Amino acid sequence: MKQINQKIYALLHHISSILKKIDTNKVAIVIITLVFILLFALSFTRNSVKDENLYLRETMVMAEVLKDGQWFGNHGVGVHGFIFKLPVALIFMITGPNVLIATLFTLILSLLSAIFFFKILREHFKLNGWALAGLLLFIMGFEFVRTTPTYLRDIPALFTVILFIYYFFKKKNNWILGLILLLMMDAKEHVFYMIGSGYALWIVLDGIKSYDNWLHRIQYIVVEGFKAFFPVLVYQILMFTTGIIPINMFNASILGLIETGAQWAKKNFSVNVATSNLVADEASREIFQISTASIKERLSASPTPQLVIWGPIETILEWVNVGLRYLGKISYPRSFSFISIPKIVIAPALTTSVIFFFKWIKTWDRNRLKVMLVMIFWSYLFIYVFRSSHGRYLLSITPVVIIFFIIFLRNVLYNTKVARGILIATSLYILLGLYFELTFVWHKALINVVLVSLLALTMYLHTWKSKLVQLSSLIFVVALGIATTGTSLVFSWQLGQLSEYNRWGANHQVEKVVEAFPPEDTIFLNQIGWDQLPSVYRYDMGIQPEWKWQLKEELPKNRMLVVPPKSNTHVGYLPSISSLYTFVVENDIDRVGIVKSELPDYPFLMQEHIPTLQTKSWAVLEKTVKIKNAQLYIFKMNIENDAK
């Protein structure tokens, strides 16, 4: 037995020595290649939904307007920006709208993001072998894997954040960084406000720490701040006063430039909205709250009533309840978990950022650039926690979280006293989070136990000065990467894109459905999950520029907006035959298409109307079209025969 143990120990040491000799650049290429082969394959299993379809429709409109030799600055194409839609729109001018083409553009941005992130770890933080660990955690993250094969705006936003960090550490001047911040604003405005707030704080801190004279400090802050944010200022002015930049109504609502002012923005920061558990399930739990009413009742019923001091006590308890609500917010699965950033990552990363902030402040001349990461990390998390938000919003700050987590693994875990405290606190945080989980609770608990145990083992291997630390760290990183990627793929297979693709075919076979209708017709389709996608393929230009809200009347942009043509494609749910008839008359519908599911467990809205509709004189069943696991019924409208 002793000889066997010695051989195993020798083998492990041999593996550790091999790890030290690895060419990290070559391994990084292999890792990126393998992951992107997977993501490329997933790009062909598309089920474009909700927000994606709005962006696809905007891109189609951009392409059509450009084909007419015009600019689209006054059209409704600016939700979450337009710059990262423009390359796809240029391709659509040649190919026509195509979900796959748009998805592959997102894939390219993801690839560039991974490359630049690895360069940040390798070149600017000198992490060497640890750079591979960071890269692995980055490209195997839940949201990265889930979002890459989509046309959502999160990957463009992520790309701009990584680009900003990369060029910041290359010591580019603030004019260059300002242009990248402009791209960030265009990619997703709320990411700019969250990152930009932290960068503005860093500029102020840099001015204070770098100069002794207050006049010089103020001069530096004003000049560098102007350079960094002037491009965004110009962008905003052009958006609201000219036809150069399309209007982004989310940006308008954040700035209070809509008819209801800042009401929407304030609502998202209200305690009840910001801290609600976003798991939409009857069994979902909210964090415990102290009942002030019951305490007041007991105080008033006591032999010597204590209501005199009730006012201050009630105020304190209300603030305690607010604190509990925010504790719940960061504990709920839709905030930090394996479907966003795992608690086992965010807790050590945040703690490490606090530890190193004070270290870097003391060595400002050497580490002033690194302090910027702390500032954008904290500002992002602060807004994320105190605003209504969910896990997908964390994708843009994931690179910074991973950097601090890798620093934790490399520089903090060896300090047993500090590391032990962090691991205990993280374990308690994980336990609290498990209380709010509804699905696969024991699986998640087991995964967390394994991961915490691996971290603890690595910590003690540091203590024993064992050469197996690298191997233990590698096992932990690989295990964590498998857990996050596995969760993403399982989620996709059971509830997400892969599930819908497997059940209904690519994009609910929308192209086949659209081809069944004459292009000149105005049609209505029942909502089966494709949202605005039929409008994309039918070149429906009827997008309202003032999406969701109305601009303030006094804004010059208000008088420039293009009134869209009448929509030729309507998708929705109408609860009765009479409401369908009214809709057909009011919107001059030529044909109605109702898709009926052939899977009893997955019925579509309105499919129960088909038998009744066949009895109506104003609706003639023209044909049926077979699509995967469903049947499309097409009715020609003859409203002149309106005897119901």
Image: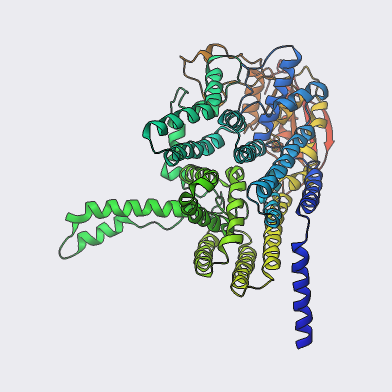
Q: Position of residue 143 (x, y in %)?
A: 66, 47
Q: Residue at x 67, y 64 (%)?
A: 473
Q: Residue at x 49, y 47 (%)?
A: 364
- Is residue 540 in view from this perspective? no
Q: Position of residue 530 (x, y in %)?
A: 71, 35
**Quarter of the rendering occupied by the C terminus:** top right
Q: Position of residue 9 (x, y in %)?
A: 74, 78
Residue sitting nearer the eye, 106 or 283: 106
| Quarter of image, res 163 | top right
Residue sitting nearer the eye, 63 or 223: 223
Q: Position of residue 573 (x, y in %)?
A: 64, 33
Q: How is the image coloured?
A: rainbow
Answer left or right for 300 relative to 151.
left
Answer left or right for 162 relative to 430.
right
Q: Residue at x 62, y 47 (%)?
A: 399
Answer left or right for 55 relative to 279.
right
| Quarter of image, res 271 | top left
**Quarter of the rendering occupied by the N terminus:** bottom right
Residue sitting nearer the eye, 483 or 64: 483
